[in-house]
């Protein structure tokens, strides 16, 4: 063990204590818990995020089972930041069940976040699987949180069944790897692969299928649109970013980083990237529900990030990490605007955005910024993310994949600009201003500042992710 136990595990310990406090408040306090529990959770997450700034790279626990390298610390900060933004949005939810059972909601979210933080630090397959399940199980609960809604219950059940299948693939793959290597340490896998053990390749293939379910790569994305449409929007904003970021970090550790990188995985990742990008963009075009449109758009963005992983290089990994940051601000911001409009219009249809620029110009401008970022238009965060990602893939000669991604970026602009046309060209149905609660507005403003700030000055973020990725190779 390097570093003291308390120092290395400080964020995880802090998050666990916060979860216990939230649970106890839920037991003690009756009635409306939303404000008290929400504020405690949000402030607590900010404190845990602050503790990650003091982590020393290289700390480990349990003979390297749990590590705090640059990748783990970066991922934890990303996950906690997404959690804070989601909490800001959820503080304004007015549903009776949420007010009464707010402690349950926040406890489940914190438990899932704890699993994600353990997952990104896991260097042992047993810890990896336990963390994976700790991350996943609360997500099923949160999806069906408004349990009297039939659509919500159906989406939660579908998510649970798909998640169970993905867990089965992962644990089955781990069993093959352990059978060959006699160890659950991730460091033993590259040597077994180099020896050409077929069962090792089978085990790694099965684990990749399980992780593809979690990041919603095609054809393992079938749970995404129903879950996004049915669940509460601030939770969906977090679900669209955090579990996928944790899944990508796991894939980087297992298949891409250092001695794990092998050209054998290249055809698999290239195929996944190609079909995911194509399917996500094409399925987004006919959508008339904004949350389903963003769901399929999210699948397409997973494809773009897989293009970066296909490079199997430090620059490719670095640009995937940068893409995750840009995606966090752009995607979460868009979902927060969706929440504001849905409350006002009682609709999540794209038609509800007709004339939004005339009714609420600042809200429409924020949505436009987020859509342009997701579409990769200069000069916002998403533009640099796509550009650097394509450059990393081109450096490795993946010109066909880069060309496909560039063409599909134009396709994506079509359905993003359909929403923009509704906001700025179509006449409004009514003239009432869309009221945005202060905390929800703060979440939207934070995301907009992130998108614009990174777009104007991306250099610090690019330098950071390059440093993190170079240490892995």
Image (spheres, helix red, strand yellow):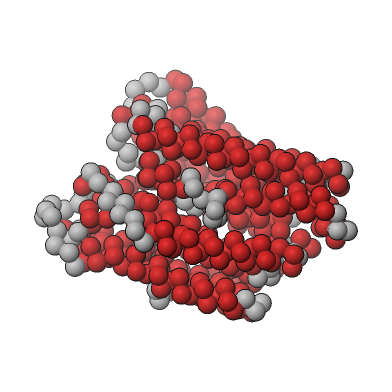
Q: Is residue 96 left or right of residue 311?
A: left
Q: Quadrant of residue 111?
A: top right
Q: Position of residue 202 (x, y in %)?
A: 76, 51
The percent position of residue 426, horizontal first and vertical second, equals 17, 64
In this rendered view, identify the residue nearer to me: 231 or 373.
Answer: 231
Residue 468 visible in image: no
Figure check: 407 above or below 48: below
Quadrant of the image containing the N terminus? top right
Residue closest to the eye, 146 or 397: 397
In the rendered structure, the answer to whether residue 77 lies left or right of residue 455 reads right
Residue drawn at 40 percent across, 76 percent down:
378
Q: Is residue 314 left or right of residue 139?
A: right
Q: Is residue 239 above or below residue 402?
A: above
Q: Residue at point 69% right, 66% down?
A: 266
Query: Please, is residue 471 above or below residue 233 in the view?
Result: below
- Identify the residue at image location x=46%, y=48%: 224
**Residue 364 x %, y %:** 25, 61
Quarter assignment of residue 115:
top right
């Amino acid at each position: 063990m390097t570093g003291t136990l308390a120092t290395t595990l400080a964020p995880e310990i802090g998050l666990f204590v916060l979860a216990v406090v939230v649970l106890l408040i839920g037991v003690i306090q009756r009635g409306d818990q939303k404000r008290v529990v929400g504020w405690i959770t949000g402030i607590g997450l900010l404190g845990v995020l602050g503790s990650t700034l003091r982590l020393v790279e290289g700390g480990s626990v349990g003979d390297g089972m749990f590590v705090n390298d640059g990748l783990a610390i970066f991922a934890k900060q990303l996950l906690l930041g997404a959690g804070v933004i989601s909490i800001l949005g959820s503080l304004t939810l007015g549903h009776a069940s949420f007010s009464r059972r707010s402690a349950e909601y926040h406890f489940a979210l914190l438990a899932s976040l704890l699993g994600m933080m353990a997952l990104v630090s896991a260097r042992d397959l047993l810890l990896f699987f336990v963390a994976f399940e700790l991350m996943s199980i609360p997500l099923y609960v949160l999806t069906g949180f408004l349990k009297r809604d039939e659509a919500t219950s159906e989406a939660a059940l579908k998510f649970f069944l798909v998640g169970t299948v993905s867990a089965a693939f992962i644990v089955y793959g781990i069993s093959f790897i352990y059978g060959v290597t006699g160890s659950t340490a991730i460091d033993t896998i590259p040597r077994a692969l180099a020896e050409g053990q077929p069962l090792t390749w089978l085990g790694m293939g099965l684990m990749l299928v399980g992780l593809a379910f979690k990041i919603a790569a095609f054809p393992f994305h079938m749970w995404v649109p129903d879950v996004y449409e049915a669940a509460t929007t601030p939770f969906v904003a977090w679900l669209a970013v955090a579990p996928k970021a944790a899944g990508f970090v796991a894939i980087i550790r297992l298949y891409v980083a250092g001695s794990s990188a092998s050209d054998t995985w290249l055809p698999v990742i290239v195929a996944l990237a190609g079909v995911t990008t194509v399917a996500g963009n094409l399925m987004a075009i006919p959508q008339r529900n904004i949350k389903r449109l963003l769901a399929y758009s999210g699948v397409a963005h997973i494809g773009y990030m897989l293009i970066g992983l296909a490079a199997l290089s430090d620059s490719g990994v670095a640009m995937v990490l940068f893409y995750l940051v840009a995606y966090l601000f752009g995607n979460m911001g868009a979902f927060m605007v969706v929440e504001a409009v849905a409350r006002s219009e009682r609709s999540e249809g794209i038609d509800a955005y007709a004339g939004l620029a005339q009714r609420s110009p600042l809200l429409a401008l924020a949505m436009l910024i987020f859509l342009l970022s997701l579409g990769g238009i200069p000069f916002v965060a998403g533009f640099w993310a796509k550009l650097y990602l394509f450059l990393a893939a081109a450096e490795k000669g993946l010109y066909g994949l880069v060309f496909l991604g560039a063409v599909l970026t134009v396709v994506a602009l079509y359905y993003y600009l359909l929403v923009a046309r509704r906001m700025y060209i179509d006449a409004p149905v009514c003239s009432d201003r869309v009221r945005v609660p202060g905390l929800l507005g703060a979440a939207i403003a934070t995301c907009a500042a992130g998108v614009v700030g990174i777009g104007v000055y991306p250099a610090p973020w690019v330098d950071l992710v390059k440093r993190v990725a170079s240490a892995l190779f």
